Image (spheres, helix red, strand yellow):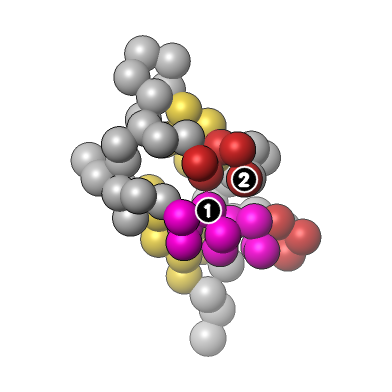
Amino acid sequence: MNIGVDTTRCCGAGQCVLIAPDVFDQREEDGIVELLDATPGEALHPAVREAAAVCPGTAITVREPS
């Protein structure tokens, strides 16, 4: 799994941080998403998929290995 974030699409809702805090954080100054781990371990994959699914700005992209 490879994760990307588009900070221009992020609205700072913070759902990703609540769901997958080992992978996502928010900038102090404006709450915009920060990617902590672009290639998380398999145990975190379900949480990352959920975070991407609930992101209101669709700022998170998940690329699965083919």
Left or right placement of residue 27 versus residue 41 in this view: left
Neighbours of disc 2 within 10 Å: few (<14), some (14-19), many (20+): some
Q: Is residue 36 visible?
A: no
Residue visible at 56% across and 63% down in the picture: 49
Q: What amino acid type is highlighted by mark number 1?
A: Ala
Q: Which residues are magenta?
A: 45-54
Q: CA distance from mark 1 to mark 2?
A: 6 Å
- Point out which mark residue 51 bears: 1
Q: Is residue 1 visible?
A: yes
Q: What amino acid type is highlighted by mark number 2?
A: Ile
Q: Element type at marker 1? A: helix
Find disc 2 in the rendering and name its residue.
Answer: 19
Q: Quadrant of residue 50?
A: bottom right
Residue 59 location (% of width, % of height): 34, 51
- Point out which mark residue 59 bears: none
Residue 31 location (% of width, % of height): 39, 24
Q: Are marks 1 and 2 in contact (CB under 8 Å)?
A: yes
Which quarter shows the N terminus? bottom right
Residue 46 location (% of width, % of height): 66, 64
Q: Quadrant of residue 34?
A: top left
Q: Main secondary structure of the magenta part?
A: helix
Residue 17 location (% of width, % of height): 56, 37
Residue visible at 33% across and 19% down in the picture: 30
Does label 1 or label 2 sit earlier along the sequence?
A: 2
| Front residue of this view, candidates 30 and 23 | 30
